[in-house]
Amino acid sequence: MGKERLIPNLFLSMKTYSKEQLIKDVIAGVIVAIIALPLSIALALASGVGPEQGIYTAIIAGFLISLLGGSRVQIAGPTAAFATIVAGIVAKDGMDGLVVATIIAGIMLILMGVCRLGSLIKFIPFTITTGFTAGIAVTIVIGQLKDFFGITYAEGLKPVETIEKLEALGKSFGTFNWQAFIVGLICLAVLIVWPYISKKIPGSLIAVIVGILLVKAAGLKANTIGDLYTISSSLPKFHFPVLSIDLIRSQFSNGFTIAILAAIESLLSCVVADGMVGAKHNSNMELVAQGIGNMGSALFGGIPATGAIARTAANIKNGGRTPVAGMVHSVSLLLVLIVLMPYAALIPMPTIAAILFMVAYNMCGWRGFVRICRSAPKSDILVLTATFVLTVVFDLVVAIECGLLFTCFLFIKRMSEETEIRNWKYYDENDPDGIELRQVPKYVRVYEISGPMFFGAADRIAEMTWKDYTRCLIIRMRGVPAVDATAMKALEELVDRCQQRGVQIIFSHVNEQPYKTMVKGGFADRVGRENFCSHIDEALARAAVLGEDLR
């Protein structure tokens, strides 16, 4: 995979493109645009930006990622994964902060693709992705409770963090609007029931129509998008932020989080799509396209984007088989922006909340969460719950950083437990099983090390001991695949102790990486290369010769 050339899949698809496939791609692109319209608006509002900015994202990022991507069928646009982090950035640092964070993420994604790091995403543990995905789902639900219940916050109350929103809900619940609540409940019921009626027309579109009818025709009182936001149907405009070192420094961790999220979700979507169409994506080209698409979106008023699994699946089911379908989806949304965007003002906010409730439910992965809690080791459950709680209580940046930190510590602990240093039993002629053992002279002590010798297990080297009459110490290393600098320091200290006591060290079966490390640092010359033996029998023979000389 790492040797694949960085060629957009569109260019490869054009070699065998046909008129029949063009018709299928156009139909699929238009249908996906209909699905993406209400979702893009809802996700933009959940991200703390205007409704048209969600459309900008689907238009620009969607087009660029389809044009340059490494997947035949990927559909990109705003997704729920970014909603929490984007809302936090916008609330604290405004759109300029978001643009800088997204550009940083775009540069990181491009570098990841150019450096052929597409396969490294598999090293993000499933426990972390499950934990923060469930956490994002919970934060989305909490963030939409205000509009679902028709609550109005008190003057000057503008909560940003999830816990602050819960506290504000408690303080403002006296403003509960039962009519808005009914609108939200009916729209939520439509979203749940509609897939059983028809799978060709998206339930979110039906819910929007029902919500508008409930407010405008039935007269139920609920805030609409037009009551809270100024709707713009103008085309995206280029905007470059005023840069400063402080702004770049403050947004670097946000940019890193956006890049990791975009990489994980887009490549996961590609893998799912590959299984559906029997194809294979180019992960490195996809990362480059994600980087360019996100930078383009940010510079033209959009928000971060990535591959959307649900929209990608809809594209495949409706006949889309080349990147042309994704480009048609973006062009269709551009036409909607110009012609129909003013009508988005009619959509009730409880309807948006209901749509986002369903998005949160579909993304939360609660079954996988429960399965891990039931069957995984306690350490994995700790990482899962910690990532989940930190996402909800603090934010996604803290959750991912701490989750990775916990995982690394636990991995080091597990690996150190796998490293074993054991002392060979001496040959005993009175032992009935002794004839099976090699005879070890009394003045020779043999230790065998199994597992990697690294900083997490280096302290065990200090546990090697010997008797006053010991003259040779054999260290058998056939089960050691690698050593690091910390382990080498511990071995050097062991050599010092041996020299002080007049004990000669002999190494048996040192593998390639450890031996190269020992030679490079001068350790092999210090011990004497003649004291490195390829087999334990050779080492014992060497010890026998040295023992006679040392006694």
Image (cartoon, rainbow, N blue to C red):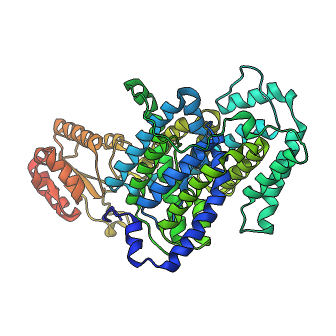
Q: Is residue 4 left or right of 272 when viewed as pictured?
A: left
Total count of labels: 0
The answer to which quarter of the image holds residue 244 is: top left
Tell me if residue 54 can be seen. yes
Point 33% across, 69% down: residue: 436
Q: Is residue 80 left or right of 248 when viewed as pictured?
A: right
Q: Is 389 located above or below residue 173 in the figure? A: below
Residue sticking out furthest to the top: 156
Point 42% across, 45% down: residue: 106
The answer to which quarter of the image holds residue 347 is: top right
- Residue 373 % position (x, y): 66, 52
Q: Nearer the viewer, residue 547 or 479?
A: 479
Tell me if residue 466 can be seen. no
Q: Which quadrant of the rendered structure holds the N terminus?
A: bottom left
Q: Nearer the viewer, residue 319 or 382?
A: 319
- Residue 491 % position (x, y): 24, 43
Q: Nearer the viewer, residue 459 or 200?
A: 200
Point 82% across, 46% down: residue: 184
Q: Nearer the viewer, residue 426 or 529?
A: 529
- Residue 325 % position (x, y): 53, 66
- Residue 476 % position (x, y): 26, 56
Q: Is 473 located above or below residue 90 in the figure? A: below
